[in-house]
Image: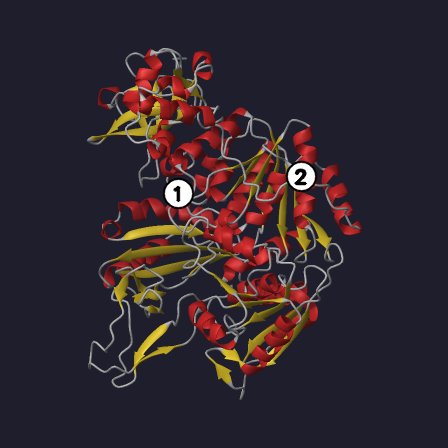
Amino acid sequence: MSEPSVLRIAIPSPLRRSFDYLPPEAENPRPVPGVRVQVPFGNRVVIGILLEMAAGSLIAPRRLRRAIRILDQEPVLPPDLMALLRWGSEYYHHPIGEVLQGALPAQLRTGAAARLRPDTIWRLTEKGLATQPRELARAPRQAELLELLREHSAGLSPARLERQHCNWRPAMLRLKEKGLVEACEITPPPVMAPVTTAGRGNPPALNRAQQNAVDRLLESATGFSVTLLEGVTGSGKTEVYLRIVERIIATGRQALILVPEIGLTPQLLERFARRFPGRATVQLHSALPDRERLAAWLAARDGTAPIIIGTRSALFTPLKNPGLIILDEEHDPSFKQQEGFRYSTRDMAIVRARNAGIPILLGSATPSLESLHNAARRRYRHLLLPERAGAAGSPEFRLLDLRRQPMQEGISFKLMEIMEEHLQRGGQVLLFLNRRGYAPTLLCHECGWVGRCHRCDAHLTLHQRQQCLRCHHCGREQPLDSQCPECGSLDLRALGAGTERIETVLQERFPEFSMARLDRDSTSRKGSMQRLLGEIRAGQRRILIGTQMLTKGHHFPDVSLVGILDGDQGLFSADFRASERMSQLIVQVAGRAGRAERPGQVVIQTHHPEHPLLQQLITEGYSGFARSALEERRSAELPPYRFLALLRAEATGRDLPLQFLQEAHRQAGRMEMDGVTLWQPVPAPMERRAGRYRAQLLLQSASRGALHRLLDQLLPLLEESRSGRRVRWSLDVDPVDLY
């Protein structure tokens, strides 16, 4: 049998296939799968990942191009990650090259070495430590540098020196010639989770439900299992996480904690950092610089970081000794990647845990219906934390009927009276409205002109403070004119309310109470979110206004009232998941009330107080809603009782996406359907977005296997179709958003 001599390489391209190359001329050791290979591709040179060594190729050897060089001796993607990513590529029908490339830190995608280049710092030598700055009186710039380095005995980087001492290099070189300073190389440490409060403190005592959860989880800590930890808001899920992680890392294994968004879970990060000082590594989120991301990635790979905390892409971090995966807020839609490789973090994390033979813990106060369905079928173990930890009790719910009620910019006078009562008693008030900006629509009262986005089928949102109109779908922005662009009238009226408008109204109504607005606009500057949260916890802000950013696990002990300003949002949506998401938002934001000694109250403004969903939420809680919702899904043959795939297409011309999808419909119709329902192509609910027209084709089946067999046949034909080259198209398996 001949020795394998062909490199089968995954190239980052939209083609769903691998490519064969001859080994480099100077190849020495035989490369192993998972290493990076530099190869010619068309008229470019790209970085690919070796999938396997093959004995031959379907392409004649004389036509095969030769790889340029092998970049790694050891695989940057170890075998367990390669297996996971290949599974993901097959299940989500996404090109393997793009899947593997996306799993690497940005610096490794460009061919950089899989190690950190050391930092250079300048520090004093023993001679420099013994030298006083006054001895350099005739060289004042050298004396200043000597004094600066004496104040920073660990040394200073060139960047720090640049900020503190302009034109420092000539004087530093003179100090070096005198033997007073030296340049040293150090390896930068990975970024650790920040600690904003001092002291580790003793962990709180566990209640009976928490202790039971910890004991049950530790029983299965050495093998694969999936556990759904459902706990009411404030029930102490994080403390359960901490106890389990403590036991896992004590055995020399690593824990991977996945959170929806790093910036919105600061208290969870801080609790990990305080409990495990110097051992909780935050990595792989959008705000982390590339070099720091690589440092954390390498620390996890080498086993020097026992705890890794990150967002969905952290799932693809190599772990030397994996021991546990935790998915916090497992229901959160942001765990589904919505562009490119459209994977579910939850589902792929379960596959990774199964392959590694380790437990995975899914935590939420409002679990997804899919997870509850799997728990009911005993695929997942289901553990409950039914009561709040400590002395906190459950908040009181009240539906506030808005019909015939006097209102001011979306707030009823009755709610303002309730706010006054809580504020006078020293409590904090939180108002939730999932709509940022001042108003969602600007209207001319004279001619009826409405501010619309020229690139989307959407209205422009008025942002009063920035004096602009902004599209929240494509980001387009234009200055706010004082008169109507159609008729010139000055009577322009803002319709509806966003968080900015609510803040303005409340500043007029409660001028004696300080307030904080938390949304994407008010927290865009670095550090602003942490500053506001610190002021809220210190009691410096009495009225809190915000979007769903306020629902993500924050602990505000003085919040005694939560007001939900638009309880009707999602009651009558065409999206079958809208009621689930609305219920989760209501329960999550309601959970901010009464988390300490103060009793909590939740007031939901609604024009439909008799609506069954709202009634069920306040009488039976989220579990009651979930039971009814699952029964409705079963009757309607929707997930989790059916499996979906959504074929999307978009183009600058209106007709092209539908033409492509109609061709896909015809192609699929000629195949063996095997129980797969093929719906007619339709325009997307928002047909035009960012200047492109969008359409979609839904496939539905009671059998996951039948659906994938059809897709396996259909996608190669679509790649070769002429109409497919005129549109941008994608496939979304198990979509969470039909928009």
Q: Earlier in the sequence, mark 1 or mark 2?
A: 1
**Residue 71 in picture, x, y percent from top left:** 35, 21
The correct choice, above or below, for 334 with respect to 582 in the image is above
What residue lies at 34% left-to-right and 58% top-to-bottom?
665
What is the x, y in percent for residue 389? 73, 54
Query: Which residue type carries mark 2?
Result: Arg
Count how many numbered circles sit on residues in the image.
2
The label on residue 571 is: none
Residue 56 lies, in percent from the top left, at 34, 21
Res 452 → quadrant = bottom left
Label 1 SS: loop
Q: Nearer the viewer, residue 188 or 38?
A: 188
Q: Secondary structure at mark 2?
A: loop
* Residue drawn where x is 52% and y is 86% of the image: 406
Is residue 86 something one can see in this rendering? Answer: yes
Is 208 displayed left or right of 401 in the figure? Answer: right
Residue that appears at 43% across and 36% down: 103
**On the image, numbered disc 1 is attached to which residue?**
94
Measure the C-alpha gap from mark 1 to mark 2: 45 Å
Residue 647 vertical placement versus 488 (above, below): above
At x 46% / y 27%, what residue is drawn? 151
